[in-house]
Image: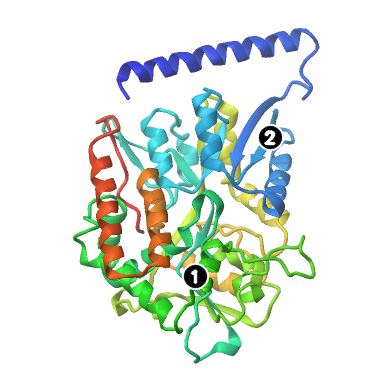
């Protein structure tokens, strides 16, 4: 984007702010607004259902005495919704996203506001890498909640048995990400954090890298080790949600997970810490680090892939900056932990933050997140620019259906083409994307 375009966007937003201020002033002259004079701060985020209700409860508590009214809009089509709002020049005050690649693009287009220094203190790596802007380090987002991804869940009755992997690849607009998590985790444990970082940040040739090819082929070998998969089983996995299905006796109930009966016969599942929501009530499913299953190097057994939901400010509202600061404070996180129902209590990035202790699995996961001897690397596909990330999603779906060498060669060539096409500078030269994605 040219400097002139960026100035034009700032001018439109400034005018928009003046108009809003005028409307607020007119409302005050006519007796005030419905909120009793409070300013509305809109938050767009990914949580719906019980998670969304818990977050709304926290916002309600934080609004008391703040002079603001916090309004939450939860959606499973987060990217599409935000893109439409930005195109209409009507962004939310705060957006909560899980993609560093997307956030970097918004920052490069001057659609994010740098966070106040007092808030930036909670920008823990690797969730909130700093960006170089005009030669200065700036922080544009902070993690609200985090998750650990390098985990294996299994039936206790399957101890010592050959793994038969539970796979559900469907996730609406982001279908395929459970497969990219497999490839990413394998590459991290086989090639190590340095190579993983090069790959995730666009510095590695997909088609020529032995590490990338080996990660894909290892995934296929692991899936095949449990026995041949029928065409029907493959298609079922491609269309089945990673959450699994509800119990047929309670079709309106919560999903029961892939190990909970959605895929009879499978024994092990590679999935992030958030899946404990469906497994916590059971005592026949356990969790452990993924490293020993991935045919990796012993040198990288203490490496973990992580993800997170990060808050960014998109307007000039001081109330929006204040809200992010309060959400990431110790009090804000304690309120959120209390508001969430058991097994949905969030994980936070610092050991001083509240830690879910609903069950043994939650306590174990929390220790991995806060152990300084572990290396935490942010989800690689969520570091990539959205165009490349989406192509990666589609590639793993194709490879899952047809895990042949020829198919893989074609897919890696296509992905490398995408990488090189977007490698040319598309952001202002004064903004340098982050590369510090491992801690």
Look at 58% across and 64% down and name the residue there: 240
Q: Is residue 368 left or right of residue 415?
A: right
Q: Badge 1 is on which residue? A: 234
> In the rendered image, which quarter contains the C terminus?
bottom left
Q: Quadrant of residue 62?
A: top right
Total labels: the figure holds 2
Secondary structure under tag 2 reads strand
Residue 10 in the image: x percent, y percent?
Answer: 43, 18
Is residue 434 visible to the viewer in this orientation of the structure? yes
Secondary structure under tag 1 reads helix
> Eyeballing the image, is 55 above or below 91?
below
**What crowding class fits label 1: few (fewer than 14 Cα within 10 Å), some (14-19), or many (20 or more)?**
some
CB under 8 Å between callouts 1 and 2? no
> Eyeballing the image, is 222 above or below 323?
below
Look at 55% across and 29% down and name the residue there: 85
Q: Nearer the viewer, residue 161 or 321?
A: 161
Residue 210 in the image: x percent, y percent?
Answer: 21, 67
Numbered circle sitting on residue 71: 2
């Amino acid at each position: 984007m040219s400097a002139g375009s960026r100035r034009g966007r700032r001018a439109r937003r400034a005018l928009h702010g003046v108009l809003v201020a005028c409307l607020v002033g007119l409302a005050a002259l006519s007796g005030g607004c419905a909120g009793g004079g409070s300013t509305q701060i809109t938050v767009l985020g990914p949580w719906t259902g019980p998670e969304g209700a818990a977050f709304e409860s926290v916002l309600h508590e934080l609004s008391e005495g703040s002079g603001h009214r916090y309004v939450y809009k939860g959606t499973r089509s987060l990217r599409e919704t935000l893109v439409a709002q930005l195109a209409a020049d009507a962004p939310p005050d705060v957006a909560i996203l899980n993609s560093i690649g997307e956030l970097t693009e918004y920052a490069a287009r001057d659609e994010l506001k740098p966070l106040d220094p007092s808030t930036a203190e909670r920008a823990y790596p690797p969730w909130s890498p700093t960006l170089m802007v005009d030669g200065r380090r700036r922080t544009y987002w902070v993690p609200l909640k985090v998750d650990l991804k390098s985990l294996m869940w299994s039936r206790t009755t399957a101890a010592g048995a050959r793994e038969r992997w539970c796979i559900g690849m469907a996730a609406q607009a982001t279908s395929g990400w459970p497969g990219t998590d497999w490839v990413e985790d394998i590459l991290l444990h086989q090639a190590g954090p340095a190579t993983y970082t090069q790959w995730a940040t666009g510095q590695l040739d997909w088609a020529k890298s032995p590490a990338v090819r080996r990660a894909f082929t290892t995934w296929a070998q692991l899936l095949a080790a449990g026995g041949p998969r029928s065409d029907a089983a493959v298609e079922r996995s491609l269309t089945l949600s990673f959450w699994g299905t509800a119990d047929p006796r309670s079709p309106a109930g919560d999903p029961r997970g892939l190990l909970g009966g959605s895929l009879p016969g499978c024994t092990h599942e590679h999935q992030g810490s958030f899946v404990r929501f469906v497994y916590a009530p059971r005592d026949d499913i356990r969790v452990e680090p993924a490293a020993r299953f991935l045919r990796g190097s012993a040198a990288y057994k203490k490496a973990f892939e992580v993800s997170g939901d990060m808050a960014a400010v998109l307007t000039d509202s001081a109330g929006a900056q204040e809200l992010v600061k309060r959400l990431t404070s110790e009090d804000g996180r304690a309120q959120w932990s209390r508001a969430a129902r058991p097994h949905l209590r969030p994980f936070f990035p610092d050991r001083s933050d509240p830690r879910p202790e609903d069950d043994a699995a939650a306590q174990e996961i929390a220790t991995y997140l806060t152990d300084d001897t572990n290396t935490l690397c942010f989800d690689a596909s969520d570091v990539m620019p959205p165009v490349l990330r989406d192509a990666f999603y589609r590639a793993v779906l194709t490879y899952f259906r047809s895990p042949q060498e020829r198919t893989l060669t074609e897919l890696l060539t296509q992905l490398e083409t995408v990488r090189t096409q977007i490698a040319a500078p598309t952001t202002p030269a004064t903004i340098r994307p982050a590369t510090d994605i491992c801690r």
